[in-house]
Amino acid sequence: RENPSSLILLFGATGDLAKRKLYPSLYNLFRKGNLSNRFAVVGVARRLKDDGEFRNWVRDSITTFGEKADNLEEFISHFYYQSHDVNDSESYKQLKELVDRLDHTYQLEGNRIFYLAMSPEFFGTVAEHLREDGLTNTNGFKRLVIEKPFGHDLASAIELNKRIRSAFKEDEVYRIDHYLGKEMVQNIEVIRFANAIFEPLWNNRYISNIQVTSSETLGVEERARYYDKSGAIRDMVQNHMLQIVSLLAMEPPIRLTTDEIRSEKVKVLRALRPVEGEAVHDYFVRGQYGEGIMNGSKVPAYRDEPNVPKDSNTETFVAGKFLIDNFRWAGVPFYIRTGKRMATKSTNIIVQFKDIPMNLYYKNGSTLNPNLLVIHVQPDEGITLHLNVKKTGEVLGTTPVKLNFSTKSIDGINTPEAYEKLLYDCLRGDATNFTHWDEVALSWRFVDNISEVWTNEQADFPNYAAGSMGPKAAEELLEKDGFFWWPVN
Ligand code: BG6
């Protein structure tokens, strides 16, 4: 089937995300023949002058962050620029003229993707103007792609959703969670539902706990203005971490359709045991990095980063325990941890199976390690299964071994960037790997309870050194349940 034609209207065309991810990803789609020739991109921003300057910008982005090929100039010829004031109807009217003209030139059949890769404070305004000034009035499809954060808490998310929904129907809204575009996050479903050896064990009879770690080595970089109001719980847990947990915990969907999968994920979020008031201290741990040594050089504490208040109470690390109160998961903790300025950049999932009923090999002094299934999300992509085997030459000795699968070793290529896949999904109208409103709302409801407690109590920060794996309390969170964080590698 031919790839659908479309106009992509990109708000925030000179932003960091567009430059690092969106242009290189679009170009990859083009190179691979996954983008119809009938496409045009209108970049909307304020800082550039004209098409020429914009095309230079796009070329620069692709040569810096992407892979260049022969047809780059042809690709770039599809790019147009419009200087724009998000609050001014006149601006949208000019935009509409340009869009209508391109629609005709490239035979786009009225198909339109509006991509908001800009400051979230404008999301609502832009959506409303798009409708009021006639841009959403089209014969083809219209889709809104919206970057995070989707609100700051449940109340603001509801407000934003109302404004967006005045212009777009729920199934026209593509809320990005770029973790859902990661190859191994998409693989969770396949590992679970395509393997007879896992799914029968995937429950509280055989799994003792699940650990999801997403650690970063970078600090807050240039984003303190946003980050200091957000913190790790809103920045990472409300979206990426809870999405991973719902994929790990959901029931098998009846079919692999968008609606069926989403409905199973929503059920997990509904079954999350709410953590409120005093209980927050038992289930969640927060941290903020102090100075430390990373790669041999000293890095500053969070509070000494540019634009961070000296007394900031914002967490740059969260560890937490989710309990899912349903038949499958009753009693199985799902632990998550995520933070900035940690020892490694890595995301992985560790499923720890329960111990076998008795250890026949104990007599010899050897203990048995539990079986682990490790799903490596990044930087490596693959799975590792930890088993016990006989120690060569010994009668009763056992030794742990690892069965390894790395996607690189099979496909021999780098897997496509998350954004490339998500853009392609959106062009084809597949919303499976985007977040439904119900998921957003339930996640905020859960997270708001924790934020509320944390906002009202001054934390004893900083409490972990840059370059470490987080505060001691994160270790204790598992120790009190008789577990520990498995080493990441
Ligand atoms: C983003 C957060 O959603 O995810 C960032 O806003 C974070 O703070 C990033 O650094 C992590 O993404 P990745 O793909 O590098 O793990």
Image: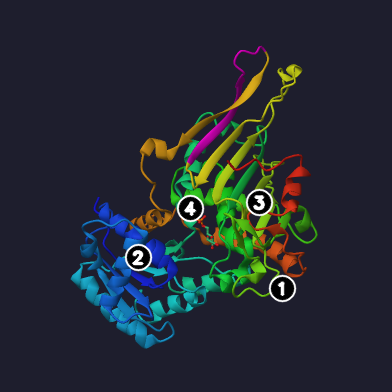
Which is nearer the N-term, disc 3 or disc 2?
A: 2
- The reply to whether the C-beta atoms of the residues labelled 1 and 4 are less than 8 Å apart is no
Count of numbered tags: 4
Q: Within 8 Å: ligand 1 and the Cβ of disc 3?
A: no
Query: Disc 1 residue type?
Result: Asp
Disc 4 to disc 2, how far (Cα)?
A: 24 Å
Disc 2 to disc 1, how far (Cα)?
A: 37 Å
Disc 3 to disc 4, how far (Cα)?
A: 25 Å
Disc 3 to disc 2, how far (Cα)?
A: 34 Å
Q: Nearer the viewer, residue 411 or 116?
A: 411
Q: Nearer the viewer, residue 35 or 306?
A: 306
Query: Disc 3 residue type?
Result: Met
Query: Disc 2 residue type?
Result: Ser
Q: Nearer the viewer, residue 199 or 209?
A: 209
Q: Nearer the viewer, residue 348 or 197?
A: 348
Element assignment for label 3 = loop
Choose top left, top right, bottom left or bottom right for residue 205.
top right
Query: Disc 4 residue type?
Result: Leu
Which is nearer the N-term, disc 4 or disc 2?
A: 2
Residue 394: in magenta span: yes
Q: Residues within 10 Å of mark 4 (few under 14, many from 20)?
A: many
Residue 205: in magenta span: no
Q: Quadrant of the C terminus?
A: top right
Q: Which residue is mark 4?
A: 180
Residues rendered magenta in the picture? 382-395
Q: Is residue 444 above or below residue 321?
A: below
Choose top left, top right, bottom left or bottom right for residue 29.
bottom left
Q: Which residue is mark 1?
A: 311
**Mark in the foreground, 3 or 4:** 3
Left or right relative to 160: residue 417: left
Element assignment for label 4 = helix
